[in-house]
């Protein structure tokens, strides 16, 4: 039980996929302008991350490793992630057209989101069991969503702030992201 607690705290706070490992920055900066879009992207990435973590673990354990074809790991993992993203995109387009429009180009970019592939590979490198791989993936998904929500909350508040014109948009988003990243470094002494 303690192992799972360490995995959760480490993935959400200490080794946050966005704020500590700097993976998945594109949707972090692009979608985090509105809370609703951030929640939608967080949910989509969470779904893909958790399923990709479980499926890629099974592919590695039951196909790639036994047949000694580990060199196909990246290709196999990307195919799994792409299929999951296509499924998520079709579901969101059908059941939530407003969210689909709000996420825009960032939704199909989940396929190339290095955070998703990174977590799948980390699960294999750390030699997790299936249970630990799923918890690890879910925890990184929670950390990703937490980072998006925090960033969107700050950016929504800044819409009413008096920000110099040269700092509006991307520059202030980068400064906020850097400050958030530095603040998450404070968690590194927890475990």
Image (cartoon, helix red, strand yellow):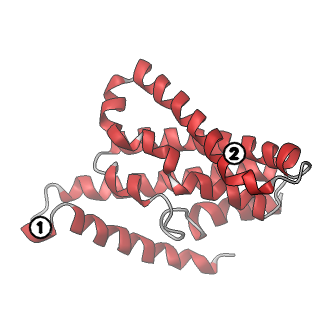
* Left or right of 169 in this view: 25: right
Of 153 and 88, which appears nearest the observer?
Answer: 88
Of 148 and 61, which appears nearest the observer?
Answer: 61
* Left or right of 6 in this view: 66: right
Q: Secondary structure at mark 1?
A: loop
Using the image, determine if residue 189 lies above or below residue 122. below
Q: Circle 1 is placed at which residue position?
A: 163
> How many badges with numbers are in the image?
2
Using the image, determine if residue 9 lies above or below residue 66. below
Q: How far apart in space, not on screen, are marks 1 and 2 (Cα)?
A: 46 Å
Residue 173 position, x and y percent, is 28, 64
- Residue at 20%, 59% (x, y): give it: 158
Q: Circle 2 is placed at which residue position?
A: 76
Residue 123, image quadrant: bottom right
Residue 36, image quadrant: top left
- Residue at 49%, 63% (x, y): give it: 18
């Amino acid at each position: 039980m303690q192992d799972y607690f360490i995995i959760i705290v480490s993935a959400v706070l200490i080794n946050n996929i966005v704020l500590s490992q700097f993976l998945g920055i594109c949707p972090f900066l692009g979608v985090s302008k509105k809370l609703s879009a951030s929640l939608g992207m967080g949910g989509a990435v969470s779904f893909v991350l958790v399923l990709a973590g479980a499926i890629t673990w099974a592919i590695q354990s039951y196909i790639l490793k036994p047949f000694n074809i580990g060199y196909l790991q990246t290709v196999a993992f990307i195919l799994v992630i792409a299929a999951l993203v296509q499924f998520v995109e079709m579901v969101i387009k059908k059941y939530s057209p407003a969210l689909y429009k709000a996420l825009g180009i960032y939704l199909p970019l989940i396929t190339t989101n290095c955070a998703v592939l990174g977590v799948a590979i980390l699960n294999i490198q750390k030699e997790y069991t299936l249970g630990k791989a799923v918890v690890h993936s879910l925890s990184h998904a929670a950390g990703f969503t937490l980072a998006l929500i925090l960033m969107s909350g700050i950016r929504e508040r800044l819409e009413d702030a008096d920000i110099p014109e040269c700092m509006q948009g991307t520059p202030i988003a980068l400064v906020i992201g850097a400050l958030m990243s530095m603040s998450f470094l404070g968690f590194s002494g927890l475990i």
